[in-house]
Amino acid sequence: MAYCKEANDGLCHPAITVQARQLVSTVCILGGAECPLIGKDQAQAILGVLKSDPTVTIRLESQADEIPHYSLLGPDDYARMRPEDVFNRKRDLDVLRNLGLVPGDVRRARYLYELLFDRIKTPDGICAYDTPGWEGCPHARSGAYERIRDKGWQAVVHARTGDEMREYRERNVERIKNADRLFLRPHHMMCYACWYAGGEGQGLRSNDTLAEIGERIRKDPDIPITLVEGPCMACDCCDGFHPPNGRCVHTCGLIRDYKKDLDLFQKLGIMPGAKMKARDFITLLFDCVQSTREICGYGDGVVTSEEWRICSSPEGSPGYEKTRQTGLF
């Protein structure tokens, strides 16, 4: 029987569940407001988790679709509806619409708060209005949300320090230099080829160690490579890598990069764990994949959502094509 040590805290197992409006509430409370939409203790508990783990998953919910068919409701039922509950359903849908999400969607913490601050500049117009009966939260115009938004997602969610990333880079560079085998996710060599561009890549890459890996491969084309699914030797110093659990939280990088790897494994006719010499892998890659459109552009160049954005051009990266023509060795 096959044995695989799969982590059980993936995207389909949310650690935190909140009403969509409460995502905004956590920011307001962090900014010093007494938000009535979420208990302070609940908000503080959520914020404490976010500050320790940017990979934690959050499920956004709404009761908007729990209202029954009109034929099941009578005048007394409508009379018993609390205006605040109606307002909250609108708040939830306003937040979700701005984020491009729907009730039940699950995303990692860093991604959500980056998206939140990019799409929602103020809770005014979501949590409060000038319309009589819809005045809403008195703190929506206090500036509490905006004060935290101005600081960026790092004010809410754990972010790696520069010192930590430099330490991991130094450690990883030594590992790459001295290793008798490299462990790489296959699409990362396409990233390297795009950057290398037939000899035009200069210096180090700020957020990974692909330059060092490429240098090792060029010096030692016969070094064995094990092709892996998920974060690899190039990832350790990235600001989107979380060392305690080895997960990637880079914006939009989480899911699309897994698809790139799996698409590339299929294209190359191999499986995760495949082993071969570096030169053989590069030859196989360049023989089987003529353009990044085939993998990074999903074959059709169509962006279906924010999470499925395309690197470089939907028509293909000129850098990859040039490196493919000139080679690495």
Image: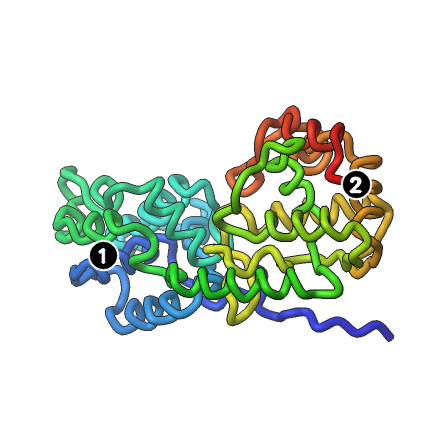
**Front-lying residue, 31 or 218:** 218
Dividing the image into 4 quarters, which one contains the N terminus? Answer: bottom right
Say if 297 sits above or below 226 in the image. above
Q: Is residue 328 left or right of residue 73?
A: right
**Would you call the spot at circle 2 few (<14 residues within 10 Å), some (14-19), or many (20 or more)?**
many
Q: Contact (CB < 8 A) between labels 1 and 2?
A: no
Please indicate, yes or no, whether residue 48 appears anywhere in the rendered image: yes
Please indicate, yes or no, whether residue 72 appears anywhere in the rendered image: no
Q: Residue at x 34, y 71 (%)?
A: 48
Q: Is residue 109 left or right of residue 13?
A: left
Quarter of the image where one finds residue 302: top right
Q: Earlier in the sequence, mark 1 or mark 2?
A: 1
| Percent coordinates x, y for residue 86 in the rendering | 30, 49
Q: Residue at x 70, y 32 (%)?
A: 323
Say if 327 sits above or below 3 in the image. above
Q: Is residue 133 left or right of residue 329?
A: left
Say if 315 sits above or below 272 in the image. above
**In the structure shown, which secondary structural element does the residue marked by tag 2 occupy?**
helix
- Give the distance between the C-alpha atoms of the residues marked 1 and 2, in whole angstroms: 49 Å
Residue on which the image places disc 2: 285
| Percent coordinates x, y for residue 111 in the rendering | 45, 51
Residue on which the image places disc 1: 28
Task: Say what amino acid the circle numbered 1 marks.
Answer: Cys
**Front-lying residue, 93 or 147:** 147
| Percent coordinates x, y for residue 204 in the rendering | 52, 46
Quarter of the image where one finds residue 284: top right
Q: Is residue 166 left or right of residue 74?
A: right
